[in-house]
């Protein structure tokens, strides 16, 4: 009788522990990481927000595949004489996402994404989970640069406004220039000192 009673008590205690453990796992799984704030997004996106739209979209999509970005960056380093369309054709048989393949045409961009992999991962997470906020951030940053006199059409790019959006396109569709700029300068007075670009 004592044995049956101790078995029943052991079974009850085990059941309570299992239910508690499952409940704790459910609570942990339901707590997704908090979304990035507008200030954090602006800080993260400042280095790429002034890229032409066609390149920017590829960077944002490729950031959702950080492992493939690393592989593509290694391929690019191993094949330094290949660039542009020639490089893209050479990686056509790779299993990478198309966005990652397209970036082999821009080895400097791939290198930056590879060297700052934590940043790349965050951009990918933000793009997957907060696409609307990411696009709003890019427009906010472009407006800051434009208001500071640092975003305008030139020989390499055409900057135009359409509805509420600032669009950046290559001046010649077949040639995309990657702008080089200092985010701490190009946007003027940075509005979030706690989140520098």
Image: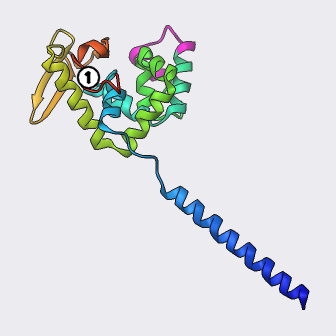
Query: In the figure, 181 relative to 130: above or below?
Result: above
Give the quarter of the image for residue 149.
Answer: top left
The verdict on residue 175 being magenta is: no
Crowd rating for badge 1 (residues with CA inside 10 Å; few <14, some 14–19, many 20+): many
Which residue was labeled with disc 1? Answer: 52
The verdict on residue 78 being magenta is: yes
Give the quarter of the image for residue 145.
Answer: top left
Q: Can residue 5 be seen by looking at this rendering?
A: yes
| Residue drawn at 46 percent across, 47 percent down | 33
- Please tell me which residue lies in front, 94 or 186: 186
Query: In the figure, 150 relative to 129: above or below?
Result: above
Q: Can residue 93 be seen by looking at this rendering?
A: no
Residue 31 place in picture, x, y as percent: 48, 54
| Residue drawn at 39 percent across, 18 percent down | 85
| Residue drawn at 34 percent across, 22 percent down | 196
Q: The N terminus is located in which quarter?
A: bottom right
Residue 20 place in picture, x, y as percent: 63, 68
- Please tell me which residue lies in front, 184 or 95: 184
Residue 155 place in picture, x, y as percent: 18, 8
- Please tell me which residue lies in front, 140 or 94: 140
> Quick one: SS at disc 1?
loop
In the image as oriented, which residue stretches furthest toward the bottom?
Answer: 1
């Amino acid at each position: 009788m004592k044995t049956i009673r101790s078995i029943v008590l052991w079974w009850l205690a085990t059941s309570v522990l299992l239910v508690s453990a499952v409940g704790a796992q459910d609570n942990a799984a339901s707590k997704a990481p908090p979304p990035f704030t507008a200030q954090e997004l602006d800080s993260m996106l400042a280095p790429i927000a002034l890229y032409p739209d066609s390149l920017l979209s590829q960077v944002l999509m490729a950031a959702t595949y950080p492992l493939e970005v690393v592989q593509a960056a290694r391929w690019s380093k191993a094949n330094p004489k290949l660039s542009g369309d020639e490089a893209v054709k050479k990686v056509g048989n790779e299993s990478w996402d198309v966005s990652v393949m397209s970036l082999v045409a821009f080895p400097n961009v791939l290198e930056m994404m590879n060297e700052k992999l934590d940043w790349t991962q965050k951009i990918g997470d933000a793009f997957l989970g907060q696409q609307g906020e990411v696009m709003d951030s890019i427009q906010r940053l472009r407006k800051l640069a434009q208001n500071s006199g640092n975003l305008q059409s030139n020989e390499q790019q055409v900057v135009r406004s359409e509805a509420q959006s600032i669009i950046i396109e290559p001046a010649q569709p077949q040639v995309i220039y990657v702008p080089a700029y200092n985010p701490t300068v190009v946007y003027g007075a940075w509005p979030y000192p706690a989140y520098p670009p």
